[in-house]
Image (cartoon, rainbow, N blue to C red):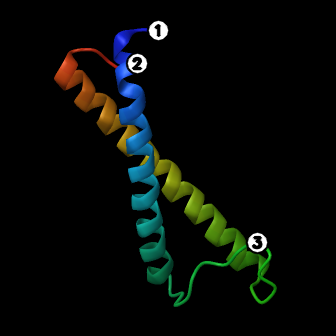
Amino acid sequence: MRAAKIVYKPVGLALGAISGMLAGAVFKKAWKVLGHDGDAPDATDEERTWREILLAATLQGAIFAGVKAAVDRAGATATRGLTGTWPG
């Protein structure tokens, strides 16, 4: 394993935690923009419709994937800028 990969591991873990928190905040805001006052439904929430549950899950998954990809890419780009080596 290259040294850049080893050094990047803890950075990648920290970026993963940050991206999770950021994605959660973005999802909550998006859910409110869609006109929902409360929290997003859980899959077992009996009072919510299938449509609402599937919409929430799809939106949440897309936001989490997009934010994670953006944060991971920014971290890799910054690492290359600092070390001259791509961490992947």
Mark 1 or 3: the one toward you: 1
For label 3, the crowd category at 10 Å Cα-Cα, with few meaning under 14, some 14 to 19 and many 20 or more, is some
Mark 3 or 2: the one toward you: 2
Front one among 75 and 56:
75
Q: Position of residue 17 (x, y in %)?
A: 44, 50
At a point 63% along the width and 62% down the height, the residue shown is 58
Q: Where does label 1 land, which residue?
A: 1
**Residue 74, placed above or below residue 22:** above
Q: Where does label 2 land, which residue?
A: 5
**Residue 26, placed above or below residue 72:** below
CA separation in Å, label 1 and label 2: 7 Å
Q: Residue furthest left?
A: 82
Q: Splitting the image into 4 quarters, where does residue 47 fall?
A: bottom right
Cβ–Cβ under 8 Å for marks 1 and 2: yes
Q: Amino acid at mark 3?
A: Ala
Q: Amino acid at mark 1?
A: Met
Q: Earlier in the sequence, mark 3 or mark 2?
A: 2
Instruction: Tell me the tag on residue 43.
Output: 3
